[in-house]
Image: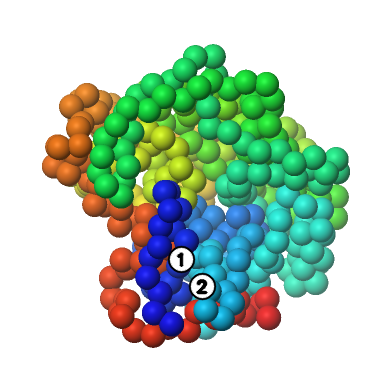
């Protein structure tokens, strides 16, 4: 079939297998071009099919020749209906990892569930014995608690007051005012239950109880802080409360891992176009301005550049500098004073009429479509493509 992008709001309803594969190849080539990383050799990535999780899996495999197990929750294609981009990404990753002689297996299902944890535990026992590095990169809006069965839904809301500011529809370039009502009832608690650290700790407990973590094993979860302009709706809002919980959990997990000399870290990454960030009001406008400034300064990074730098310079490069709250900061270039000062100045003047000049809306839009395998260089989108692609280890 010929697959074209079909969008609804901040979601793309279709994805392109060839475009997704080319995206994966581009990331693999980038990691290989940067040279070898003396990193972990047996890696588990929870949330492995898109964004930072996919970049982590690629950086481990092609930077450090690591054996990887990836956990994700994606939809395979059926005849006449494309699969989700994460499924195509994983199929491409496994294909190229296997061709390079690297172990790569994947498990598709709800990472919050006990069943998937058990499947992963059994796979590690059978194939790898122990794990050196666990990356926790889940981005789900809902979670069913594995013991109580209660279903929690996260919300994106400020805490205390109504938040009003500018946002942009990145499809049309229209800048408008938006107001978001504050959290109420159990909104904060629900969001913490979905996006906080409880499930991360459950994963580490499951692995440790079965003696599946090697001596000195490391685990990393990803977080975001962001600028002043997004603080009320993001870091000081419901999602920020969940991120605070996630970051506090790192210390608990580190205590749990003392017997094997293990460590848990949170890495604060930069603002990037992801399926999750596209859904957050205000963020698309901020990112389009940020991209313009960082590209002009030659310090722009995508997911793969961020994670390759995290691995090569921080986790395995000898410069594990932590901030005052014990976090790794690879948002350091984004949060530079000169960068933020310029973004703030642009923010004040941003309108529908001038955004195409002062911001990088085209870069934002391209990155969004790239997530789904569209607008990727070197791909013939007029060609017939087989939509049914299998992940080799999930036949």
CA separation in Å, label 2 and label 1? 6 Å
Q: Nearer the viewer, residue 35 or 150?
A: 150
Q: Residue furthest top?
A: 160
Read off the residue under disc 1. Answer: 14
Q: Reading the chain from its start, which is encountered first: label 2 or label 1?
A: 1
Q: Quadrant of residue 211?
A: bottom right
Q: Nearer the viewer, residue 171 or 356?
A: 171
Q: Quick one: label 1, few (<14), some, or many (20+) residues within 10 Å? A: some
Q: Is residue 65 above or below residue 191?
A: below
Q: Is residue 248 above or below residue 94?
A: above
The residue at the point 13 percent across, 42 percent down is 357
Q: Is residue 83 above or below residue 328?
A: below
The residue at the point 85 percent across, 40 percent down is 148
Q: Quick one: label 2, few (<14), some, or many (20+) residues within 10 Å? A: many
The residue at the point 31 percent across, 38 percent down is 168
| Element type where label 2 sits in the image | loop
Residue 195 appears in the figure: yes
| Element type where label 1 sits in the image | loop
The residue at the point 64 percent across, 33 percent down is 191
Residue 217: x and y in percent read 68, 50
Read off the residue under disc 2. Answer: 82
Residue 150: x and y in percent read 80, 40
Residue 39: x and y in percent read 54, 58
What label does residue 188 carry, if any? none
Q: Nearer the viewer, residue 278 or 122?
A: 278
- Contact, CB < 8 Å: mark 2 with mark 1? yes
Q: How is the image coloured?
A: rainbow
């Amino acid at each position: 079939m010929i697959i074209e992008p079909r969008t609804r709001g901040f979601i793309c309803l279709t994805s392109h297998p060839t475009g997704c594969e080319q995206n994966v190849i581009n990331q693999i080539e980038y990691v290989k071009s940067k040279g070898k990383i003396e990193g972990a050799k047996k890696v588990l990535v929870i949330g492995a099919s898109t964004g930072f999780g996919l970049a982590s899996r690629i950086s481990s495999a092609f930077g450090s020749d690591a054996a990887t197990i990836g956990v994700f929750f994606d939809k395979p294609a059926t005849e006449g209906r494309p699969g989700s981009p994460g499924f195509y990404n994983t199929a491409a990753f496994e294909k190229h990892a296997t061709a390079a002689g690297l172990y790569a297996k994947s498990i598709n299902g709800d990472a919050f569930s006990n069943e998937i944890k058990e499947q992963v535990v059994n796979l590690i026992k059978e194939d790898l014995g122990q794990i050196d590095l666990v990356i926790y990169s889940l981005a789900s809006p809902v979670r069913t608690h594995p013991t109580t069965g209660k279903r929690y839904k996260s919300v994106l809301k400020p805490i205390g007051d109504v938040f009003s500011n500018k946002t942009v529809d990145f499809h049309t370039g229209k800048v408008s005012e938006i107001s978001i009502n504050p959290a109420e009832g159990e909104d904060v608690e629900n969001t913490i239950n979905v996006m906080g650290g409880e499930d991360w700790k459950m994963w580490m407990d499951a692995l440790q109880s079965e003696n599946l973590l090697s001596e000195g094993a490391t685990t990393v979860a990803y977080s975001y802080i962001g600028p002043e302009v997004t603080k009320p709706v993001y870091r000081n809002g419901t999602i920020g409360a969940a991120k605070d919980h996630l970051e506090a959990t790192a210390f608990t997990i580190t205590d749990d891992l003392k017997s094997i000399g293990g460590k848990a870290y949170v890495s604060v990454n930069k603002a990037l176009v992801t399926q999750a960030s596209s859904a957050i009001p205000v963020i698309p406008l901020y990112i389009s301005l940020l991209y313009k400034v960082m590209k002009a300064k030659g310090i722009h990074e995508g997911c793969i550049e961020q994670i390759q730098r995290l691995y090569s310079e921080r986790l395995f490069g000898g410069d594990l500098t932590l901030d005052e709250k014990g976090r790794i900061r690879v948002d350091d270039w984004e949060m530079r004073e000169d960068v933020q000062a310029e973004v703030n100045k642009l923010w004040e003047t941003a309108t529908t009429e001038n955004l195409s000049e002062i911001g990088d809306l085209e870069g934002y839009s391209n990155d969004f479509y790239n997530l789904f395998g569209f607008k990727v260089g070197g791909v013939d989108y007029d060609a017939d493509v087989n939509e049914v692609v299998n992940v080799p280890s999930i036949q």
